[in-house]
Amino acid sequence: KNEVEQSPQNLTAQEGEFITINCSYSVGISALHWLQQHPGGGIVSLFMLSSGKKKHGRLIATINIQEKHSSLHITASHPRDSAVYICAVRFFTGGFKTIFGAGTRLFVKA
Amino acid sequence: DGGITQSPKYLFRKEGQNVTLSCEQNLNHDAMYWYRQDPGQGLRLIYYSQIVNDFQKGDIAEGYSVSREKKESFPLTVTSAQKNPTAFYLCASAAGGSYNEQFFGPGTRLTVL
């Protein structure tokens, strides 16, 4: 069964804390996508990666292809980081298909 | 500004009525997608289109229909055959190719009364 599992489901942090959100998947993938969904519902693309590590501001995404695992890190968290973070994997099965994780709800307290 | 627009943001419908959700993009993207989001679940693919005048069923197409008459537009109709239509609907688009990042619209929240 093709699955994408995210952990934790919910996360509350104090402003300034280092945050890690994990994503595990069960199939070989062509790419993995980290998305951010704000309370209003709009989704913003954070990273798309197929190997190694990417960094943008306070956000860092890593992926380990052999272990089928990716992490999203937020350094020096801020209340404006409060959102749902979604992991999506793109894989080939006769055609390309994307499966989305259920998301990690992050709340950062001031 | 380039982007994807969806309208309306909130939509209420009586049982038994069909309703059409709008999705427009000016990114010149070939591919467009419709997803449904329910609480506690990942996005699920309803329909997708990789080129004008062509579209394919996704994982949960029953009770929905689409058209792709123009590159910029990919409207979704929720028919009365959809048993549980109350959900948040997201439209996305992507450039052609296998390594294609999807860009999402703001979503439409549909509530069936």
Image (cartoon, coloured by chain):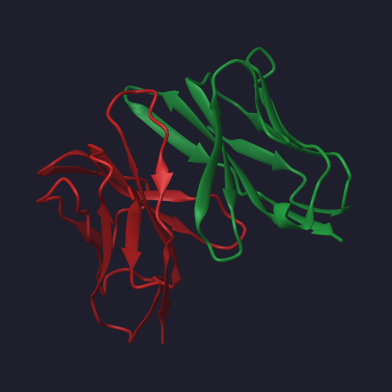
Compare residues B27 and B107 and report the one nearer the observer: B27
| Chain coloured red | B
Residue B99 in percent (x, y) is at 39, 23
Compare residues A106 and B40 and report the one nearer the observer: A106
| Chain coloured green | A
Residue A34 in percent (x, y) is at 58, 37
| Rendering quarter of residue B27 | top left
Is residue A55 depicted above or below A11 in this figure? above
For image coordinates 69% across by 34% down, the residue present is: A57
Residue sticking out furthest to the front:
B1
| Rendering quarter of residue A69 | top right
Residue sticking out furthest to the top:
A66
Q: Quadrant of the C terminus of chain B?
A: bottom left
B72 left or right, relative to B94: left
Is residue B111 depicted above or below A23 in this figure? below
For image coordinates 22% across by 60% down, the residue present is: B75
